[in-house]
Image: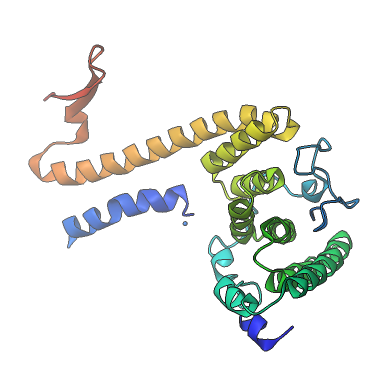
Amino acid sequence: MSERLKTSDISNEDVIEDLTKNIEFSLRSDAPEDNLNGSETADDSENATGDRKERHPDFEDIPLNAPETSDPHEDDKEDSDSDSIDEVSLKDAEMDLTDDQKEKRKGVAEELKVVGNDAFKLGEYECSIEKYTEGLKICPLQFPRQRAILYCNRSAAKIKQERYKQAIKDCTKAIELDEHYLKAYVRRACAYELTDKLDESLADYKKVLELDPKHKEALEASVRLPPKIEERNEKLKTEVMGKLKDLGNMILRPFGLSTENFKLEQDPESKGYKINFKQ
């Protein structure tokens, strides 16, 4: 490859803390896809039309909870130069290429993808990422479907490495290149759930069901996720109200009052709220 081509969420607790910390301070003093020509390899569990096994084998050993010991900011540091794709430089590099040369580059990218798939099957995820990235750096931009596959394959390897945020970015890029790419939505939904982005995960699974109404994993998620989202929202609401109550008590204390002197009531007709004072 030429040198020219080579150049070519925060947590609920963090949200709550950010809602109140400034006010409090002033008051005192956080598997490889099919190959580039459209046929599938043995490691695929679903193709672009939605055919699948019951559970994607790439993710069978990944729990649907992010590891408690993982650094929530670790993924933010993973944008290395080796993984980045400079499409502006790629576009410039391709301007003088003939159609035959572009086809040859597409073929080289296909070979790199196959090598990446083989490495993935052996559990050599870093090697597979390197090969998919090399493929992305040489595959011409005029082949969006092929590039989408490379991005989606790379996301599977990153999920295996628990690099969930980077996997989400790769899936998003694959979807930008192919908005009907079912497997990219499934993988992104999985990565979203692993990073506790439940609303985003559910939205992706709903998109999967639009593309394939009988998709088993998406159907299960559409039942599993709503109660988890409701439970999380109730917990967040309780935590926020607790923080606001503590803040209110701090403000009212000099006046000999507390939040117990105020009662929040909902109007049954208007559904609005009013505050009643009691001594």
Task: Point out the residue furthest to the top here.
Answer: 269
Count the numbered circles shown.
Answer: 0
Residue found at x 43% / y 50%: 13
Residue drawn at (65%, 37%) of the image? 208
Q: From the viewer's perspective, is 127 left or right of 245?
A: right
Decide which of 115, 263 is in the foreground and name it. Answer: 115
Left or right placement of residue 254 versus residue 188 in this view? left
Q: Given the current orientation, which residue lies at the most extreme bottom position?
A: 3
Choose between 17 and 153: the one closer to the eye: 153
* Residue 219 sits above or below residue 135 on the image: above
At x 82%, y 56%, the residue is 37
Q: Kindly indicate the quadrant of the structure image that contains residue 272.
A: top left
Percent position (x, y) of residue 142? 66, 63
Coordinates of residue 170 in the picture (x, y in percent): 63, 59
Of all residues, the one furthest to the left in this rendering is 255
At x 55% / y 30%, what residue is drawn?
A: 226
The way the protein has been coloured in the rendering is rainbow
Q: Is residue 91 left or right of residue 257?
A: right
Residue 215 is situated, as x and y percent measured from the top left of the image, at 73, 32
Q: Which quarter of the rendered picture does the N terminus lie within?
A: bottom right
Image: 227 above or below 120: above
* Residue 195 sits above or below residue 140 on the image: above
| Quarter occupied by residue 249 | top left
Query: Which quadrant would the C terminus be assigned to in this image?
Result: top left
Q: Nearer the viewer, residue 261 or 165?
A: 165
Tell me if residue 266 comes above or below residue 189 in the rendering: above
Give percent across and percent down for residue 185.
65, 45
